[in-house]
Amino acid sequence: MYRNTYVEINEENIKHNVQEIKKKYPNYTYYMGVVKGNAYAHGSYIVTSMKEAGINYFATSSLEEAIEVRKYDKDTPILCLEPIPPKYIEDILRYKVTVTIDSLELAKEYSALKFKGKLKIHLKLDTGMNRLGVKTANEVQKIFSLFTDNHSFVIEGIYTHMATTGINDFYFDRQVNKFLELTKKIDLKQIPIVHLGRSLTLVNHPKLDFVTGIRLGIILYGMNGSTPLPTGVKGFLREMKRKHFLKKYHVSPTTRQNDLKLKTGFAVYTEVMNVKRVKKGETIGYGAYFIAKKEMMIAILPIGYADGMHKNLKYVSIHGEKRPIIDVCMDMTIVEVSTKVQRHDKVEIFGNTISIKEASRNMGENAYHLFMRMTTRVPRVYQDKTEVKY
Ligand SMILES: Cc1ncc(COP(=O)(O)O)c(C=O)c1O
């Protein structure tokens, strides 16, 4: 690392999250770690910690991502969530990737393949998102019969993706019913891994009897999705109203509260590259938009929008104090500082003093987007001192 700008990944915190989730929600057999998007920007290296803590399946979105995970984990099964063209069968087998079958057309293409070995497949059903997946029970049945007597394939899983996680969740019920309708012509019990939900399905809805797996994304990275109720009479009345609503509209039980104690493990740091005294009336940065109203000290930081930095973050933290951002260029950021600040002082962009929640709020985006905004130009540094450049 030649430039002291990096994302510090706290593996212990991610491990803690896995353990905490498994402790509070112990009745799933398969805890799938969703590590697409370079493990939500934490870097695929984090799979080693997730596995150590109890994740027993991974999910990526592409074959490329699965191959990246294989650099760090040789054996844990990996489900590729998007369909892979069958022409890549050699790599699929070499890297031991489980394939998603999302249409009858793709099922026909795969079932016609001749290869040595066994390929694990998961069938994806579209129960309401209109993204990927099969939409009729007849197609589901046809796909099953295509693979059932073909010894090159194992139908290991079946799944869908939930559009919502909300409190008055009609859509959840609708999707579950659709899932049951789509699978009525097959025997679900024959399929080891039935996985419908994602992070907030886990915490907002009780486990369904026929479900054996859960896909965990954002929750692994520290967001528990809990919305605390107000305390006292207000909270009591709110809860009563919610119960009445669920009963009246026959909505299955949900909760927006949980006592999962999760920790984020993603903090962005840089350092002070230079400090400058600016006189009243001088301009700072591009466009000469910022005019100093008084004499002031500024610091130049080696992080810019090519790294994912953004002016809407509002401030950075130096010596535990928030300092306003004046301008963000492609590679550098200028902030107002006090006279105490010196070259090489450590600067936090967010993740510690400025929490992920606070930074997301300032950006007007959720934690998914906040993590992903830090580009691969910024190395990920792990507690064990491993530094990974992506
Ligand atoms: C198919 C699928 N499953 C699971 C997830 C994980 O979602 P979450 O981060 O909400 O847990 C995603 C993320 O977008 C997804 O696309």
Image (cartoon, rainbow, N blue to C red):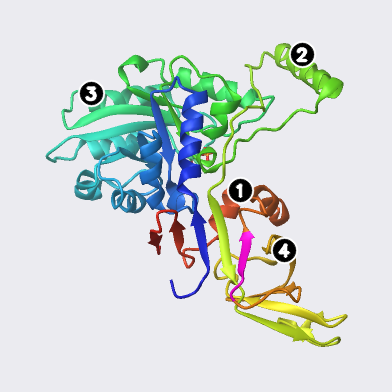
Dot 3, crowdedness within 10 Å: few (<14), some or many (≥20)?
few
Looking at the image, which residue is at 43% across and 25% down?
136
| 346 part of magenta stretch | yes
Dot placed on the residue nearer the N-terminal end, 4 or 2: 2
Q: Camera-side residue: 314 or 64?
A: 314
Q: Where is residue 341 in the image (x, y as percent from the top left)?
A: 69, 74
Q: Which of marks 4 and 2 is in front?
A: 4
Is disc 1 placed on a helix, strand or loop?
A: helix
Give the spatial CA distance, label 1 vs label 2: 32 Å
Is disc 4 placed on a helix, strand or loop?
A: strand
Give the spatial CA distance, label 3 vs label 4: 58 Å
Give the spatial CA distance, label 1 vs label 3: 41 Å
Q: Position of residue 67 (x, y in %)?
A: 30, 51
* Disc on res. 148: 3
- Would you name the residue on which mark 2 appears? 244
* Disc on res. 367: 1
Dot placed on the residue nearer the N-terminal end, 1 or 3: 3
Dot placed on the residue nearer the N-terminal end, 3 or 4: 3
Q: Camera-side residue: 211 or 133?
A: 211
Give the spatial CA distance, label 3 vs label 2: 46 Å
Dot 1, crowdedness within 10 Å: few (<14), some or many (≥20)?
many
Q: Which of marks 1 and 3 is in front?
A: 1
**Magenta part of the chain:** 344-349
- Would you name the residue on which mark 4 appears? 315
Q: Which amino acid does label 2 sit on?
A: His
